[in-house]
Image (spheres, rainbow, N blue to C red):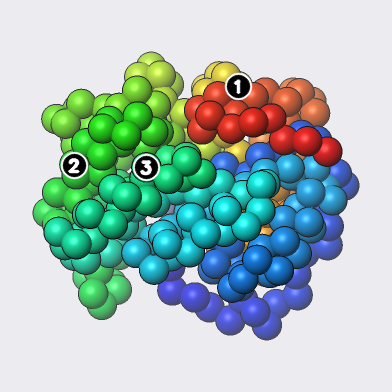
């Protein structure tokens, strides 16, 4: 959950040169404006045209979780994840737990997330769950990921120590993905050593993200995923414009430049990683 700005007034970035194969490991199709099957198809067609053959759409509240599972039924290129976002952890009632458990068992829901800790919004955003409440909700989602045998997708904003502490206390599930990894080299090392996956978004292309850009070369390609987190975090030089899954090649090329490897090679490796971690069929076309 982020405070939406006037991004709709900004012009959409041009389509990048195609880069195949790619999977957008974390996006929010509903927040990109999709309402029904036709809307989903338009967005995913636009992505497919530049090589992004599949997307994982993430929920941040219960309504969004129900919608994400339906979107994944509408289009074979769409998969979903379900959880309550840490900032919304106050809403994790018994009824909500029952419903998220049912959604997590859905065959096209491929991860439990996004969950984790957000130390940025408490006190800044009205209604944001307090850290103690977030922590309890995070622990519950960790347990759910273990019970349903699906990857845990972590949201970590200004909360490296808190997230690591909860993971260590509760015990991490087999597959852990840090979505929109934006921390420094020390945190990257911790995660890499633990065997976790780090999913990079447009933030790696931001010129002022120095600590993150220094950390990127420390991540073995085998532990790397790529994502848009659309409609947020549009990659440089389109920062502030509306983001969509079709913008993913910009971010992959920015990573390729940082680690001095061909973007085509990164595309193949990260797509293989996404298929393995989420249990997806390889995208076609
Ligand atoms: Zn997030
Ligand atoms: Zn997100």
Please indicate whether residue 239 sits to the left or right of residue 66 in the image: right
Q: Earlier in the sequence, mark 2 or mark 1?
A: 2
User: Element at badge 3?
Assistant: loop
Quadrant (top left, top right, bottom left, bottom right) of the C terminus? top right
**Marks 3 and 2 in Cβ contact (< 8 Å):** no
User: Element at badge 2?
Assistant: helix
In space, the residues marked 3 and 1 are separated at their CA atoms by 30 Å
In space, the residues marked 2 and 1 are separated at their CA atoms by 29 Å
Q: Residue at x 19, y 44 (%)?
A: 140
Please indicate whether residue 278 sits to the left or right of residue 96 in the image: right
Check residue 283 in the rendering and tell me which mark sits there, or answer none: none
Crowd tier of the residue under label 2, counting other residues whose Cα lies within 10 Å: few below 14, some 14–19, many 20 or above: some
Crowd tier of the residue under label 1, counting other residues whose Cα lies within 10 Å: few below 14, some 14–19, many 20 or above: some
- Mark 2 lies on residue: 139
Q: Residue at x 37, y 51 (%)?
A: 103
Residue lying furthest right:
17
């Amino acid at each position: 959950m982020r405070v939406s700005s006037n991004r709709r007034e900004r012009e959409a970035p041009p389509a990048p040169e195609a880069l195949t194969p790619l999977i957008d490991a974390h996006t929010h199709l509903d927040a990109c404006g999709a309402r029904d099957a036709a809307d989903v198809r338009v967005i995913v067609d636009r992505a497919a045209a530049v090589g992004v053959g599949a997307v994982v759409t993430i929920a941040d509240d219960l309504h969004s979780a129900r919608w994400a599972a339906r979107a994944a039924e509408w289009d074979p290129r769409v998969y979903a994840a379900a959880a309550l976002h840490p900032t919304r952890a106050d809403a994790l009632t018994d009824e909500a737990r029952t419903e998220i458990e049912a959604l997590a068992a859905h065959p096209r829901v491929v991860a439990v997330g996004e969950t984790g800790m957000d130390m940025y919004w408490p006190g800044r955003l009205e209604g944001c769950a307090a850290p103690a409440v977030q922590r309890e909700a995070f622990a519950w989602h960790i347990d759910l990921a273990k019970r349903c045998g699906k990857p845990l997708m972590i949201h970590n904003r200004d909360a490296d120590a808190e997230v690591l502490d909860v993971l260590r206390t509760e015990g991490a599930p087999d597959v852990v993905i840090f979505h929109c990894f934006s921390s420094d080299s020390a945190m990257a090392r911790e995660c890499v050593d633990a065997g976790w996956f780090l999913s990079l978004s447009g933030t790696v292309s931001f010129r002022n993200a120095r600590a993150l850009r220094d950390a990127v070369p420390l991540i073995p390609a085998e532990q790397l995923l790529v994502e848009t987190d659309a409609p947020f975090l549009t990659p440089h030089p389109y920062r502030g414009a509306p983001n969509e899954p079709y913008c993913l090649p910009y971010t992959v090329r920015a990573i390729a430049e940082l680690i001095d490897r061909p973007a085509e090679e990164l595309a193949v490796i990260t797509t293989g990683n996404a298929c393995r971690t989420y249990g997806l069929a390889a995208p076609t076309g």
